[in-house]
Image (spheres, rainbow, N blue to C red):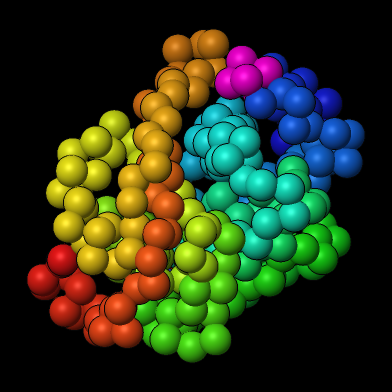
Amino acid sequence: MDRNGFISELRRVFSLCGIGELLSEEAESRLFRLSEYLVSENEKYNLTAVTDCPGIILRHLADSASLSPLLREGASLLDVGCGAGFPSLVLAILRPDLRVSALDATEKRVRYVASAAELLGLSNLTAICLRAEDGARGEMRESFDFVTARAVARLPILAELCLPYVRVGGSFLAMKGSGGELELSEAGKAISVLGGKIEQVRESTLSDGQGETLTRMIAEIRKISHTPALYPRHFSKISKKPL
Ligand code: SAM
C-alpha cells in the first residue's frame, strides 16, 4: 500500500461523503497504519473480505466515520459485535474526545482490536471479549451514552443486544444497509418493550465517485425508560423468539 496514494484517496472519498473535516494529519496517518495492519493480519485473524485499498476506504473507513456527526463531544460509545473494529477503531481515531468500548464474542478479533489500538497509541479505546447478552447483565448495563452495531444481526434481535447497555437519555445508533426500513418496522415492538423510541432515521449514499456506492441508514433509537430486568434473554431465546 502506497502511503501518499492512500491518503489522497482517503481525502477525496471523505470529502465526497461530506466528512472531510474529520481528517487531521494525525488521523490520516493512523487510518493508513490501521489499513496496512488490517491487511497484514487478515490471514491470521480472518477479519474482512474487503482488502483492496478503495474498498477499505469506502466500506470500512468512510462508513464507520459517517456515525461521527451523531456523537456528542466527550460521549461514551459501545460498539457491539465490533469484529475487526468497525466502526469503533475508526471513531476512536477520528474522535479522541470519545471514550470507546469495542465488544465482541470472538476472542481473536478482540485480540486484534486491542493490538491495533496499542499499535496506534489509542488510549481512548478498550476492547472487551464478551457475548453482548451476558455483558448487559453486569456493571455495563445502562451505562453508555451511545451504543452502536454494524452487520451483527437483524434489528429485532440487535435491539435486545444493544438497548440494555444504553443509559436512559442516551441512544442506540443502528447502522444498516438498504433493508434497514423493513427491519425497523419489524423491530417496533422490541424497541418499545426495551425502553426505546425511534428518534430519527438518516439515510445516505456513500460514494467514491468512481461507480462504487453504498446505501446506508442510521436509525437513532432514544432510550426513554429503563429496560425491564428480564432483558436481554439467553441468546437462543432472543434468536428463536425475537420480541
Ligand atoms: N461490526 C463489524 C463490521 O461491521 O465489520 C463486524 C461485523 S461481523 C459480520 C459480526 C460480529 O459480531 C462478529 O465478529 C461476531 O463475533 C459478533 N457477534 C455476533 N453476535 C454477538 C454477540 N451476541 N455478542 C458479541 N458479539 C457478537
Is residue 45 placed above or below 87 in the rendered structure? below
Main SS type for the magenta part? helix
Point out the stretch of residues depicted in magenta: 14-18
Closer to the camera in the image, 25 or 136: 136
Q: Quadrant of residue 205?
A: top left
Magenta-drawn stretch contains 43: no
Relative to residue 1, is residue 3 drawn left or right? right
Left or right: 56, with 165 as reference point: right
At 40% from the left and 59% from the top, the residue drawn is 224
> In the visual, does 168 lie left or right of 184?
right
Residue 77 seen anywhere in this rendered image of the structure: yes
Tell how many labels. Answer: 0
Q: Horizontal and vertical percent for residue 209?
A: 54, 11
Q: Residue at x 48, y 54 (%)?
A: 171
Q: Which of 27 and 36 is in front in this view?
A: 27
93 and 228: which one is in front? Answer: 228
240 over 151 or under it: above or below: below
